[in-house]
């Protein structure tokens, strides 16, 4: 009897472990106030890589946003111009806005870039994955922080 | 006279379903045509330069061509499409009694092939199905859309509306987020339209061919990184029905041209 309880407990523990692993190993983060103070990777991002990521269509940023990108003709105007983003927001605020903008406004059209659950009919190639990796978010946050007027 | 007009107007206002929050009021609806540049408009306006007209001509040939083991052509039952098909596409998707659900014009053509011509169905997006549906829908050009008037369609329109409002995909966006709330803004430089399906099947310059509304819906779903529904899926038919009902009263443009 006691043995089967131990066995069941071990089974539950291992299921919990599997469930955690299923969440695609998203880095845990702590929201403090209106931001995430700590880097998702534990290291600072690279602003130059961040700029290249913002301009890459696959990250989706400039489909909606415009910004100080004279080399790119096709920018969106569905969302605020990124010029001066580093004046308007702290690094901590930028990080949470990238991770989960819906937290501030559930009706926002800005996707939550670091979320992999609670979504509907996600395409096969994207299922269980966040839109951006922790490292990509850190690079973009580092770049946005440099956008000062 | 004005008195009667006022009564008719009041009756219309009273019976028209009130738009939900975010939905476009009837008099603010605009065809995708109005979002295009002058060159693309000119291409659609001139039948001799509109690439969709080549499909319409192909469809006209198919209309009179015998097919299947019944050895019958569309024209053998329906006669001259100019009169028999006028206004038909404007009310599709339409309720099919035998199937107890709405069917698209493409599905109706294939039901005709199966039931009356004993012919194999034409694959979705094949040249022949697009040509036939373009030819049939072209007979409704200028006719006001009436899709959704049949009361039996009500639950299916509702299903389509719910799908239109449902966020989906990795980007977690619903059709309404762009096409009700943000039309005319620019997505990567291209204006977002209201998603009024007035000209299908239509020639899309990006596709370099004619395509169905289902193809367009599927590519939007892929765009938000959602799993697109299969061609002919009840969900796609419901969405098509909702969109056509949403465009009720707008004139058909088939074959339209879009960027």
Image (cartoon, coloured by chain):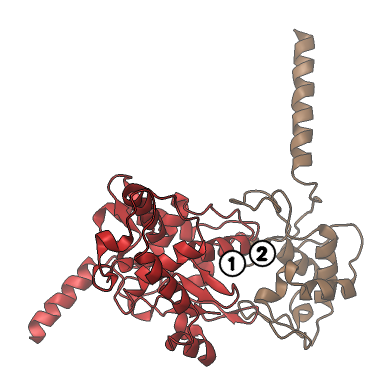
Query: Is B102 rendered above or below residue A82?
Result: above
Q: Is residue A97 left or right of residue B74?
A: right
Secondary structure of the residue carrying tag 1 is loop
* Number of residues whose C-alpha sits closer than 10 Å to that of mark 2, classed few (under 14), some (14–19) or many (20 or more): many
- Residue at 22% x, 66% y is B15
Which chain does red denote in the image?
A: B
Residue beneath the point at 60% across and 53% down? B227
| x and y, in percent, of residue B178 in the image | 53, 71
Q: Chain of mark 2?
A: A
C-alpha span from label 1 to label 2 = 7 Å
Residue B251 at x, y percent in the picture: 33, 78
Q: Nearer the viewer, residue B48 or B100?
A: B48
- Say whether disc 1 or disc 2 marks the residue closer to the N-terminus: 2
Label 1 packing within 10 angstroms: few (<14), some (14-19), many (20+): some
Tell me the element at label 2: helix
From the top left corner, tell me how far across and down residue B241 is, in percent: 38, 60
Relative height, residue A138 to residue A115 (above, below) = below
Asked if marks 1 and 2 fall on the same chain, the answer is yes
* Residue at the (77%, 35%) spot, across then down: A18
CB within 8 Å, label 1 to label 2: yes
Check disc 1 and report the residue beneath it.
A108
Q: Nearer the viewer, residue A103 or B244?
A: B244
**How many numbered dots are placed on residues in this image?**
2
Q: Quadrant of residue A8?
A: top right
Q: What is chain A's hue in the picture?
A: brown
Judging depth in this view, the residue of B217 and B20 nearest the camera is B217
Quarter occupied by residue A102: bottom right
Q: Which residue is mark 2?
A: A101
Disc 1 chain ID: A
Q: Is residue B194 visible?
A: no
């Amino acid at each position: 009897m006691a043995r089967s309880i131990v066995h069941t407990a071990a089974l539950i523990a291992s299921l919990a472990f599997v469930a955690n692993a299923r969440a695609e190993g998203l880095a845990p983060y702590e929201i403090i106030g209106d931001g995430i103070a700590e880097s998702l990777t534990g290291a600072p991002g690279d602003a130059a890589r961040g700029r290249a990521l913002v301009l890459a269509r696959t990250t989706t940023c400039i489909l909606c946003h415009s910004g100080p990108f004279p080399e790119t003709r096709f920018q969106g105007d569905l969302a605020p111009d990124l010029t001066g983003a580093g004046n308007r927001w702290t690094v901590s605020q930028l990080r949470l806005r990238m991770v989960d903008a819906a937290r501030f406004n559930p009706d926002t059209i800005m996707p939550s870039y670091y979320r992999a659950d609670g979504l509907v009919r996600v395409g096969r190639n994207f299922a269980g994955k966040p839109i951006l990796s922790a490292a990509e978010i850190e690079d973009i946050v580092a770049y946005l922080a440099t956008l000062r007027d | 006279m004005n008195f009667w007009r006022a009564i008719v107007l009041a009756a219309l206002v009273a019976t028209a379903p009130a738009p939900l929050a975010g939905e476009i009021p009837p008099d603010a609806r605009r065809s995708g045509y109005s979002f295009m540049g002058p060159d693309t408009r000119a291409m659609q306006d001139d039948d001799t330069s509109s690439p969709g007209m080549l499909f319409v001509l192909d469809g006209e040939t198919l209309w009179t061509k015998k097919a299947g083991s019944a050895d019958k052509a569309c024209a053998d039952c329906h006669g001259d499409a100019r009169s028999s098909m006028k206004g038909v596409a404007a009310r599709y998707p339409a309720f099919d009694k035998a199937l107890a659900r709405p069917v698209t014009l493409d599905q109706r053509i294939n039901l005709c092939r199966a039931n009356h011509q004993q012919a194999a169905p034409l694959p979705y997006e094949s040249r022949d199905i697009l040509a036939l549906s373009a030819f049939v829908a072209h007979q409704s050009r200028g006719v006001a859309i009436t899709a959704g008037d049949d009361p039996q369609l009500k639950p299916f329109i509702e299903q389509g509306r719910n799908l239109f409002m449902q966020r989906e995909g990795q980007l977690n966006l619903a059709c309404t987020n762009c096409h009700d709330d943000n039309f005319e803004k620019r997505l990567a430089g291209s204006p977002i339209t209201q998603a009024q399906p007035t000209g299908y099947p239509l020639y899309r310059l990006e596709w370099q061919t004619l395509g169905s509304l289902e193809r367009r819906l599927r590519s939007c779903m892929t765009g938000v990184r959602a799993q697109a529904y299969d061609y002919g899926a009840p969900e796609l038919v419901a969405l098509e029905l909702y969109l056509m009902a949403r465009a009720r009263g707008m004139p058909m443009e088939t074959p339209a041209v879009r960027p």
